[in-house]
Image (tube, grey):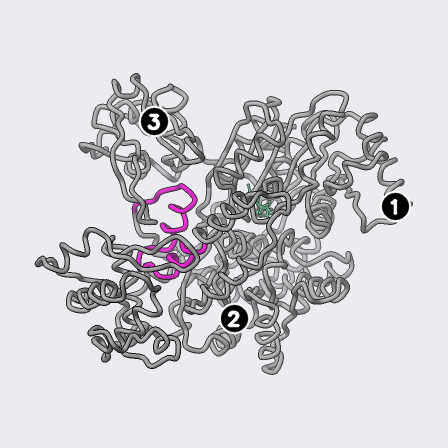
Amino acid sequence: MNKQETLKKYFGYSEFRKGQEELIDNILSKRDVLGILPTGAGKSLCYQIPALMLEGITVVVSPLISLMKDQVRALNEAGVHAAYINSSLTENQIRKAMEYAMEGRYKIIYAAPERLETSDFIRLARTTDISMVTIDEAHCISQWGQDFRPSYLKIISFINNLRKRPVISAFTATATREVKDDITCVLGLEQPYVYAGGFDRENLYFSVQKPKNKLKYVSEYIKSHNDESGIIYCATRKNVEKVYDSLLSEGVAAAMYHGGLSGSERNVNQEAFIYDVKPVMVATNAFGMGIDKSNVRYVIHYNMPQSMENYYQEAGRAGRDGETAECVLLYSGQDVMINRLLIESKDVNSDFTPEQTAAVKEHDELRLQQMNKYCMTTECLRSYILNYFGEYINARCENCSNCQMEYEETDRTEEAKAVISCVSELGQRFGINVVAGTLHGHKRAKLMEYHVDRYNSYGKLENISEEDIKHIINRMIEENILTVTQDKYSVIKLKERARDFLFGNERFIIKQIKADDISEAVKSRSRQRRSDVLNGRGLDLFESLRELRLTIAKEESVPPYIVFSDKTLTDMCIKIPFTKEEMLDVSGVGENKYEKYGERFISAISDFTGGRKEKTYFGSDEVSHIPKQVTVKKTKQPKEEFYVTERQAASFPYSEKYLATEIAVKLTETADTEKVKKLTGADIFRYVKANGWADEVYIERRRTRVVYDSGLEKGIFLDKRVSAKGKEYEDIYYSEKAQKIIVEHYIREEA
Ligand code: ADP
């Protein structure tokens, strides 16, 4: 069976997602791989498919018991023999599992890293044919990561102990340069194929809201999504309890989870959430790793997290099934302080030198500031996220709160000048709160302690709210007029431009949300819902299939989403399958699942429709509303790798210079994207790298772009650029000559 057939037979999918195929191919050719893909992108299949195709057993090292359980449960449902060995089993169960493994009854075994050090496991490993070792959540290996697990460092000695070296595959959702280096180095990966990308989760709608009353916001939000499952993340246990109590008093079926609860309480609550008994979970970030509940329709952050890495991982738990979902971050200025306290009290590895500890803290502070900037920006939120993770998109996504908000431009030149004078008068020694408070003329004790009322600036902007003043200051930071020190005090300082600005004629225009557009909780509802795809009949059918799924889940003692995802049910509602063949065409229905449940679902659909195909989704004009992977066509051809025909390429708009991403976007616009996959900047750069024209190297842990002589000859060159984070750096540009070479590379003859 080839990889495509394996994908269909066991998992019921007919197309690979971005990155999956390349990772699988490399593993199958016995090359080590490192896959960095965001949460929900589909990392598991990247090692599960080769595991099924390789000769021997695959050992998957995984940090959490819940993660292993969930994965093994899903694999068994799909008809794959897999097991886990960890401390939740009795000695007897472990022995039994090991025996079966030795007999080759399992293709995949999950184990906690600590297990690899036990003599029983080492003996087992030495007597069986282990073809691959997979390290899931591989960032746990790095002391620079947020979730360092010392036992991950032992994995390599386990591997070295094996009779023959297996192929090693490592996966993580987030890896900075340092973490990536650590993974490669500590695991001893040999010239690994590295895939980092696919960070865009198209089905997620991103939103930042600044409600006056967060509790009220959450409660209204949940009421307007009351048939849906969601997670509310809070920064502290205290907040979890506050939100949980408030929801409970309003009769919401919510569960809570934080480190202060006993192990059994946590288990009970987690299961209640997973089985949809309590569809809302209020939790600290202790919750979620390894929870593959695919029908989470929203993730609300009640507080701002500590870093974009954390945020994207937690928010990414929404919409794993590929159906639309929302990620809402509720911001308030206090969150920065809470996080700073949390960072300060965080335990750093005790083996670290004071310098290393300081470096880790500095990293944390920087990450926090970038997180804060996400909450402040008026630009496209998706672009900000993707830029942060090293991918660039040019256009606005039109699928985030910033793209949907209406802005108006206002002239704030006078206010900006007042800010500059104030910062200067205060001796460039204070943070945003003191500067804004002084300008507003506030009488807070803290301000009085600093005697700020002696200054000319005191009360200079008394008619403007402090929030508004802070907004102006933040825009000035983005515009490089002011800067913030990168230490825990975040002192505001003047940049060169400030002087020119103060004495020049330049105007300071900023974009602000239109006053009548700030209605709380409203904008976030604009994402597409199931009810936008299915019509009334379709939704009723969905409900009856959901009931059947729940009955089956209870019979089998598995969570409903393990039986079928919401997305699969939606696809059934659209396709109305009556035969085995039609049912196997539904996304997410593999052969094993068909054998187990197919007929029951077919008969439920027949009962509902009286055996007639009927229209259960909105008309053809609105078919574009149907989320990408829910196809209405009966047989969908997998998309081909990107190419353009000569004729299409003729309309490419050449320009003096482009970035790789710009070429990718513009070239994709000329192509037939019904037929071919989209081209990305990363694809182009891979091609450029493979030819030895340019590369990215790391100098003192900083990503640095280089163009070699051969690249210069092709018209590739370096030029200055300013990142979304306000940093100036050099990036690789392509002249018209280079653009031609690249475009030609993608031309295929017309069939
Ligand atoms: P990750 O580990 O990267 O967070 P998972 O491996 O849990 O993500 O996959 C997320 C979801 O996407 C799962 O429900 C999985 O079945 C689904 N999925 C993975 N690959 C595909 C694919 N090629 N087509 C459709 N769905 C997929």
Q: Earlier in the sequence, mark 2 or mark 3?
A: 2
Q: Earlier in the sequence, mark 3 or mark 1?
A: 1
Could you say which disc has been placed on residue 225 in the image? 2
Could you say which disc has been placed on residue 706 in the image? 3
Identify the residue under disc 1. 93
Please identify, in this view, whether the residue under mark 3 or under mark 1 is nearer the observer: 3
Residue 718: say if magenta. Answer: no
The magenta region covers 368-394
Q: Is residue 529 left or right of residue 648?
A: right
* Residue 176 percent across, percent down from the top left: 49, 41
Residues at circles 2 and 3 in contact by the CB criterion of under 8 Å: no
* Residue 47 percent across, percent down from the top left: 63, 35
| Residues packed near mark 2 inside 10 Å, few (<14), some (14 to 19) or many (20 plus) | some
| Residues packed near mark 1 inside 10 Å, few (<14), some (14 to 19) or many (20 plus) | few
**Label 2 within 8 A of ligand 1 by Cβ:** no
Q: CA distance from mark 3 to mark 1?
A: 55 Å
* Residue at x 66% of width, y 60% of height: 604
The quadrant of the image that shows the N terminus is: top right
Could you say which disc has been placed on residue 161 in the image? none
* Residue at x 17% of width, y 65% of height: 417
Above or below 316: residue 514 = below
Q: Nearer the viewer, residue 208 or 398?
A: 208
Q: CA distance from mark 2 to mark 3?
A: 50 Å
Above or below 228: residue 443 = below
Q: Is residue 42 visible?
A: no
Q: Name the kind of residue labelled 1 in the image.
A: Gln
Q: CA distance from mark 2 to mark 1?
A: 42 Å
Q: Is residue 503 visible?
A: yes
